[in-house]
Image: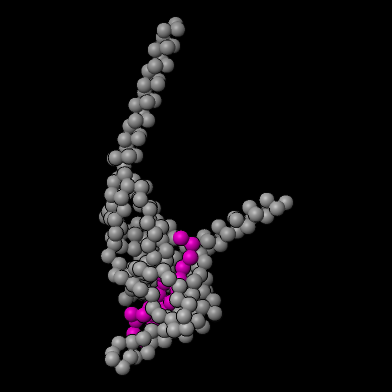
Amino acid sequence: MPNKIECLLKNCIAVTALAISAWLLYKDYIQPFQLDVRPAGRITISKNPFSEGLSQDSIQLDLIFTNQGARRGIIEDVAVVINANGKQSIFRSLAEQTDRSLNLQKDLVPPKLESFIGFQLAKSESLIHRIFFVPHSASAIVQLSIGTYDADVWVKSTESKKWIKKDFMNFTIDAEDIESLGKSKMTPLPEGGYFIKMITRDKVLSQGEERLKELTDIISNQSK
């Protein structure tokens, strides 16, 4: 009997070790590209400097892209679908902000942007990209108004042949936001082109508010 129990234990250990090795092999080398995308907690709204007469609004989002797989993958495109007051609109990725410096000078200037062309993620890699979204040509919403907005983040990548909804968020626009955006100006220059006075409004997403509330609760409990 002891020999049978010892043999059974050895077999169990061998099977467990084999299963663990197979799992590690899958996680480290075989698992396909698996993309996770989530907002960093804030959204910036402004006028779309590429629209005629600043007739459109735009949003900038810090998005965290993480490859949870073992294979390299490519993010081909990103879009935000906004829902408000029974209307649904697509804001497409147009550019990526390359300079995160805060402009505290009197004459505000547009952010430094470069065209959004997609990017790749290596195994277990995470990257933060600040993407500039503008209304699609068929969008029902081109200017933001006072109210609460639901927004879904959609991504087209090598993970799938189809667009995949990755996350959702909520943000609120108030009267002060509308007033501030209205101060953006496009002034023609003598030598051609325009000087754009760019006013932006930084908003906290509902997820960010929830994280701050969680921290407030922790601190409050510690002080008791």
Q: Is residue 175 left or right of residue 27?
A: right
Residue 32: name its quadrant.
top left
Comparing 220 with 45, the one in front is 220
* Whole-percent x, y for residue 38 in the image: 43, 57
Q: Which residues are magenta?
A: 40-60
Residue 134, percent from left and from top: 36, 73
- The image quadrant where one finds the N terminus is top left
Q: Position of residue 168 (x, y in %)?
A: 45, 60
Task: Find residue 129 and report its image quarter.
Answer: bottom left
Question: Residue 149: percent from the left, percent from the top?
Answer: 48, 69
Q: Is residue 176 left or right of residue 93?
A: right
Q: Residue at x 35, y 68 (%)?
A: 98
- Seen at 43% across and 71% down, the residue is 101
Task: Let me know if residue 51 is in the magenta part.
Answer: yes
The relative height of residue 149 versus residue 164 in the rendered view (above or below) is below
As rendered, which of 170 and 29 lies closer to the eye?
29
User: At 72% across and 51% down in the image, what residue appears?
Assistant: 224
Residue most extreme to the right: 224
Give the residue at the far front of this rendering: 105
Q: Is residue 4 magenta?
A: no
In the image, 103 versus 207, the foreground residue is 103
| Residue 158 at least partly seen | yes
Looking at this view, name the residue that lies furthest to the bottom.
Answer: 190
The reply to whether residue 182 is in sight is: no
At horizontal 31% and vertical 53% (from top left) the residue drawn is 121
Above or below, 17 against 200 in this view is above
Q: How is the image coloured?
A: one colour
Q: How many marks?
A: 0
